Amino acid sequence: MLLQVMGTAGWTHTKLTAPGGATVTCENVIGSSYGALRCPTTEAGTHTLEVRSTSGSANTISVSYAPLLSTTACKTVGAADRRLGAPTVFSGTLPAGSAGDCYGLDLAAGDVLRAHASSWRVLRTVYDATGKEICSSGQSSSALDCKLTGTAPFRTSVMSHPGTAETYDFTAARLSDPEGCALVEPQAFGVSPDLSPTARCRTLRVAQGAAYSFGPVKQDAELYGALFARNGTPAAPECSQGSCDLAPGDHTWTVDPQSTDAAAFGMRFHSAKETRGCTATHDNGLAAGPVAGTFGGPGQRLCLTLPTASGQGVYLLGRPPAEGTSAAVTVFDSAGAKQCEAGGSTFHVCKLTGTAPFRAVLSGEANKAYQLVIHRTGEAAGCAAWPQTAFDGTWGAQAPVTSQVRQHCLSLPADKHSTAEMIDYTNEQNKVNGGVHLVDPSGTTACSTAISSTTLCRLTAGVQYTAMVVFTGYGSDTYKLVRRDISPTAKCAAPASTKVGGQSTPFDLTSALDARCVRVGAAATDKFWLSSRALNEPRYGPSTAMMAVDADGKPVCRQLGLSCQVTGSTSYVMVVLASGYKDKPIHTDVDTWKVATATGWSPECTADKLSVDGFPARGGVLTESSSAYCAVIDVQPGQAFNVFGTTSAPDLAKPQVNLLSLTNWDSSYYGYQCVGGSGEFGARCQTLHFADAGQALLLLNPARTATPVEYSIQGVCDTGCVRPPSQDPKGISPSAGPAGTRTDAVVSGTGLHLGTKLKLKRDDTERGLTAVSVNPEGTALTVKVDTTDLTPGQYDVLLDGVGYTSGVPSRGYLPKAYTVTAPVPAAKGSRFVPHGPSRFLDTRDGTGAVKQRVGPGGVVTLQVAGVKGIPASGVTAVVMNVTAVQPTEAGHVMVYPNGQATPKVSNLNFAPGQIVPNLVTVPVVNGKVDLRNNAGSVDLIADVTGYYTDQAGAGSALNPITPARFLDTRDGTGAAKQRVGPGGVVTLQVAGVKGIPASGVTAVVMNVTAVQPTEAGHVTVYPNGQAAPGVSNLNFTPGQIVPNLVTVPVVNGKVDLRNNSGSVDLIADVTGYYAATGSAFSAAGPVRLLDTRDGTGARAGAVGPGGSVSLQVTGTAGVPAQGVTAVVLNVTVTNPTEASHLIVHPHGATRPGVSNLNYTAGQTVANLVVVPVVDGRVTFYNNSGTADVIADLNGYFTS
């Protein structure tokens, strides 16, 4: 019994009771969500149905039933109704809640029924004479193909499975031994199928077993169906594509019942062995021309017999005429074996490996013309020569293409190519819109480009190749192509170094096709890190691409990230080429690092051994001569450690940290990994559970940052290692700073490191403190405090991530520990007035002060305003050369504004018995300046060379220039090539030289150096043509190299330099000049901005040989963030290990060939510098040995 129980409000529960009182067990027909039930009964008679609502609310129900086996209401599907070619359509209507309709089937067991209903909501279920379910459609709209088993007669129940009202059309046809199908026999080529039969099925008669292609053909419409054996079983799955092997006999193709508008249609049917209708053609179409023709009616296939021998290849090149059609091509051999299938593509390579003759079967749009080029891949006729080119920007061949002719063939003669080559192209559209395919005579593709314009090819010596350029874009284009030798005989550059971090090999690529190759020699057991470093990623701007091949020319890597990791070959050829070129040279630095040999990691890396438990800060600078830092570290699976650090890289690109495996030297190995945040320096490095245990390599490389780039890194245990003490900040000093600038402060505490994240917090305002350096004990962390846009007041100091109660001190929480004070008023710019030089102070004879030596802690107050022609008011700062004479102890002198607290800086540093000068620029307060001696006793001299004034219309402005050498008597720069004798004067032309204007220059700033004097003496620098003043600028003893900055008035465009005794070479490096327009001076400090001894301002640690350290000066200590053109710094070098020199120059600019400080081992030497500012930072470069560098701010210039 079939039941349909419907309720209007929620679920219902039903119970069916037989006449004898037994409960009948019912089952859901389609699922528990629906009310359709099937209840097998064992008694005739009246049954009772009980329906109970389970919703707890009023519920209207309806009930319908049908006795499936005893009903006489089934409609009969007779022999005439079940014809597959034209089955009878039964239309019905099921009211809501109906138990369904019944159809009796005139079919026997073993027949295959195809039952279909027009709605997916109509459930079709087939039962045998005993009521057993044979098949069910479920909730599918597809045809129900059911092989009948069990006992006839069979019935089909048609029911609305959701119980809703439904109108339907129903068919029931016999799929086995089908009736009413039109007969189709294999067709000859050139014959169009008959489109007139209207039967919904076709009998395909196969006399000879073979591969056949078949499919319905209908004018202006698609028709869907499937192929079956005569017994109703589906054909093999591959037949669904309209092509498969068919055995002799009849096969049935029938329309899908869902296609209700089939009407008349034809059937194409061809054997792969068919030869009727084939015509002969040629296989040198690039020379002889394309095959052309017109397709006839729908479904017509054409056949071309090829003269090509077995073992050769052919190009199939579609070139449809205007308003024509593309020809889809399938090639068969004489036995009907498919060789290739080209579809309707414009390019295909077909390898003919079967038995000749071969036949190309063509299909296309009815009644339209086609053109097809068939050309042997080993035939050079019709293909232009493609010569090999060198590694430069020249190209070897051009290939014009259009939307009508999309292919262009090139030829590579057998004796004109190497065994390994790279190919590349550029084009007028400047985009990847095609491919280049190198093919040998057999039709084997040696290589082809895909998503890029370039690829690497391994070629067989003595074999001729053709190359097909295939255009996939729009309009027309012209390709310029290159192929270059990368075989063992290629002429490639040797790398500058294979040492880890050694000198990189630089290249400038000056065109879209420019490329370079580098040959790297190796042992097969060596492991190499190969990289081409450009500033842009190829996805985002002009950059480079790098590929490498081994000694056999086999491609071993393509750089997708920062490097390729290779091993196993005795040599490698790296190919570096331009990517995204846009009319400007692309600079790249190529690294060829041998990171390991058969014995293990390279010695430059094993020299530094780290621990996952943590390691102290290590710092340095990555340059192109020292481009990596590496160290070894023992690891176990499941460990992790953090690498925290600082870097001078200003943008999102940062140096990259890598953790590398010795046993899995592969770029894809991820058992070791370091992961950092976007735009952040540092990483969390970890070994996964399956990773190798052993000695790993920690490698820091510049990645896509511009070099030189400074770094400092520190390791801190994370997981599976000895964790460090908890971070516990205790205090901050200084505990106050002005709003609107950046200053350094030191956080004291325990467990501090470069990854300690601290912030200032006040109400909803938070500001992070940037780590600068940390001491090895983790008790002092130098941070940068940025108070820009902060409101003055007290701020809490908070460790990121800790909980706290406001106002109650706890670990990581220091309430009101830092005070932001009122901002420092903006300084009013001053202009420079040259003066003298004139001696204002000499304690030896009582000039300007008491005639007595200055004792330890002694202070000399010097009146400058209103003295010797300097105005009594409006003087903001004074420029003077201060000299310490015959100190009794090592010490230093500080020069600072009168009446202020003694600053923690120095201007002159000396040893006992020396005479040491240094130029100072010092703010004037109360018309005076103070000079303090810190130890022993010393005489002090001060020679004023000018002053700054804020009076309107007075003075000149500074124009800083990149430091440049104007004078060097050692080589004849700026003067005769000869030493300056006693009393000798060198007149130096400065106006009109190296960018300085020819007129209007009032004074010049230059660093003057005395080199190898023969006697103790001094040099005086003064305006040209004037009498030599009784002052000195440099004081020296025999054999010294002594520099000092001078600011000297310019007369007649010149300055004079006079040596008072012995002979000496003189050098003068100009850093700026004064004129009517330019930058105004603002005094600042003096305040210490940099000290590498303790990590003030930059990483801690002495600057190494060829190393540098940079300093942020804008936006710091009151210096404005914008508009700064130069800064005035007193720079001190201390603890040098070798004789050397220091160069101070703008960060981001090429290092000039000048010097600012010269020193010998163990000396402490100071010198004033005026250095231009380009990007907000300045750089200090140490030439050799190691040395600590100190810089004290004295002022700045703004435009």
Image (spheres, rainbow, N blue to C red):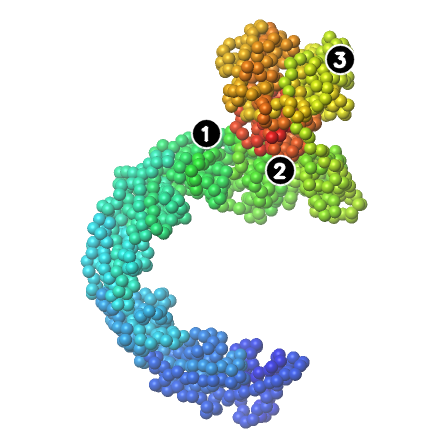
Q: Dots 2 and 3: beta carbons under 8 Å?
A: no
Judged from the image, the secondary structure of the residue bearing numbered disc 1 is: loop
Tell me if 433 is positioned left or right of 1181 in this view. Answer: left
Q: Looking at the image, which residue is at 51% across and 79% down?
A: 161
**Badge 1, how many Cα within 10 Å: few under 14, some, many 20+?**
some
Q: Nearer the viewer, residue 195 or 926?
A: 926
Q: How many marks?
A: 3
Q: Residue furthest left?
A: 280
Q: Looking at the image, which residue is at 53% across and 37% down?
A: 705
Identity, as a three-letter code, of the amino acid under mark 2:
Gly
Q: Earlier in the sequence, mark 3 or mark 1?
A: 1
Q: Which residue is mark 2?
A: 645
Q: Whole-Å distance between the Cαs marked 1 and 2?
A: 29 Å
| Residue 506, placed above or below residue 684 | above
Judged from the image, the secondary structure of the residue bearing numbered disc 3 is: loop
Q: Earlier in the sequence, mark 1 or mark 2?
A: 1
Q: Position of residue 532 (x, y in %)?
A: 46, 37
Q: Nearer the viewer, residue 72 or 877?
A: 877
| Residue 1177, placed above or below residue 459 | above
Identity, as a three-letter code, of the amino acid under mark 1:
Ala
Q: Whole-Å distance between the Cαs marked 2 and 3?
A: 51 Å
Q: Whole-Å distance between the Cαs marked 3 and 1?
A: 61 Å
Q: Which residue is mark 1?
A: 496
Quarter holding the C terminus is top right
Q: Position of residue 506 (x, y in %)?
A: 46, 32
